[in-house]
Image (cartoon, rainbow, N blue to C red):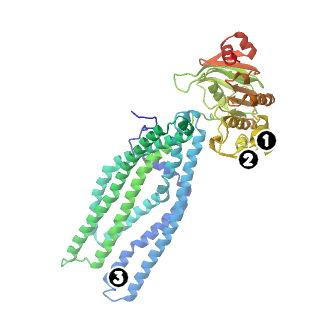
Amino acid sequence: MARNKYDVDEILEEKFDYNQLKRLLAYLKPYRKRFLSVAFMMLSASAGIMLIPIFFKEIMDTCIPAKDMKGILFYSGLTFLAAFYSAVSLRYKIHHTNLIGQQIIHDLRSDIFTHLQELPFSYYDDRPHGKIQVRVVNYVNSLSDLLSNGILNTITDLCNLIFILLFMLLIDVKLTLVCLCGLPVLAAVVVFIKRRQRRAWQIQSNKQSNLNAYIAESINGIRVTQSFVREKKNNDIFNELSQSFRKAWMKAVMFNFIMAPSVDIISAITTAAIYILGIRWMLAPDSSLTVGTLIAFTAYISRFWAPINTLAGFYNSLLTAISYLERIFETIDEPVLVKDAPGAAEMPPIKGDVSFEHVSFGYEAGLPVLQDVSFHARQGQTFAVVGPTGAGKTTLVNLLSRFYNVDSGKILVDGIDIESVTIRSLRRQMGVMMQDSFIFAGTIMDNIRYGNFTATDGEVIRAAKTVCAHDFIMEMENGYQTQVNERGSRLSQGQRQLISFARALLADPAILILDEATSSIDTETEIVLQKGLAELLKGRTSFIIAHRLSTIRNADCIMYVDHGGIVERGTHEELLAQKGEYYHLYMSQYAFL
């Protein structure tokens, strides 16, 4: 049994899926012209290099015996030109393959990041964020070398292999057959390690994902860790995951290291056999094999096994890449459950009439959170939602924002089913402040403007003043231009909520959703804030989720949510008079005041 939730193995694909590679090659299409130009230069350079042993053979067998200096200089000049063109082609190849490779990496990372932006909350609810991050960064980066050099090298090496075989056959058929005897042995090695190697790299990618997820969580929760003196326990878990990753990595690399030595050993044995048999055949009285032929052939032997060695390296990289590609494309293929319906129209300017008609929803099948919920909020009304923790209050407003799809029923805005309009046009007219007051790395001005990129500095400041954030912002060293860290670590929880509140208000929404908007604001600030909110909420339909009942006493309607539905509804005074669930909740908060 795993000691922690990260020490788990994901489901692995047993079959080697070449379709993953085909999908990757599809990213090469926009750059095929540049790719083909590089391939042409490399192949033409390779063809020139392949002629060099022939030049040596002519020098050894013809020019030297005839003392033909002009011939020697001629073939030497051709050798220099072939080598020079090869060097120029290599430089061209390095420059352009890296450009192509990095552009493909960018396209692939852009596709996965864009898709992540569209995935619903449910996807992130079920996965540690570190496991998602490792796919966008580490796994995509691991494909860099494969895309920059691997594919092109494989094509050129395969062509080189064909060139070499043709030249070898032209020089001597028997020696060529001796050289080819090593290929069946190499094929047996490949068959032996293929499945084991791929499985090892799949396991390694899982272990890397587990480690990355735990590191990300540990960094985010460092304050809790130090508060509860969990450093030693966390170190133990980290070491366990790190050791598991190290073992998986070493096992995967061990299989990689089998290929290159196997090629070298087979190459050495076949080369030795060619020398032994070549010299023996050359010494035979009726032999046509010359010293120049043997020297030229042995030059081709090293060239013959070099591309095979490179291809073996590419095969290793390919197996590694496939294990990463499975995870990358698995993320890209994750279905977008909350998306625009076919033919979805743009949401017209919202007036603010909201209706829930027999809405039911559950995060998991068979476990409903809301059942048959119905209510009607008229334009400009303020609806408050209260109830015990886990009753479905946040779920209610998340459905209105279409962060999830309802299981049954309808949600209407101005009489229009929200599933019949585009999500973007709906959410653009809604302002939402979540329980988690997320602050992005950047200036305070940028964080508030996140709700409306076209807002002027003056509009940002007015929004901050409305929610009583202006004074504490101006007390900071650079005012609105003060840099804050990711998640707003320099700010108090109350300050983060006020900035998030200003962000939501700056969007000037027709429908405003405040989820525990004032939970971390002190009582004195809350009193001032209520005055600004009273003006702001005029003419807007608003939904306020609150545990502190002082913030929602003036709401047009208060709904008490529990047991999957609306248990009570009415104004503050009406619900107190009923002496039901709301009355008991109110008395529990104010009984000792």
* Residue count near mark 2 (Cα–Cα under 10 Å), binned few <14, some 14–19, many ≥20: few
Question: Which residue corresponds to mark 1?
Answer: 461
Q: Mark 1 packing: few (<14 Cα in 10 Å), some, or many (20+)?
A: some
Residue 68 position in % (x across, y down): 36, 88
> Dots 3 and 2: beta carbons under 8 Å?
no
Asked if residue 193 can be seen in this view, the reply is yes
Please identify the quadrant where the N terminus is shown: top left
Residue at (54, 56) in percent of width and height: 102
| Res 177 seen here | no
Disc 3: which residue: 59
Q: Nearer the viewer, mark 3 or mark 1?
A: 1
**In this picture, residue 436 sits left or right of residue 28:** right
Find numbered disc 2 in the image and state the secondary structure of the residue it sits on. loop
Mark 3 or 1 closer to N-term?
A: 3
Tag 2: residue type?
Glu
Residue picked out by circle 2: 477
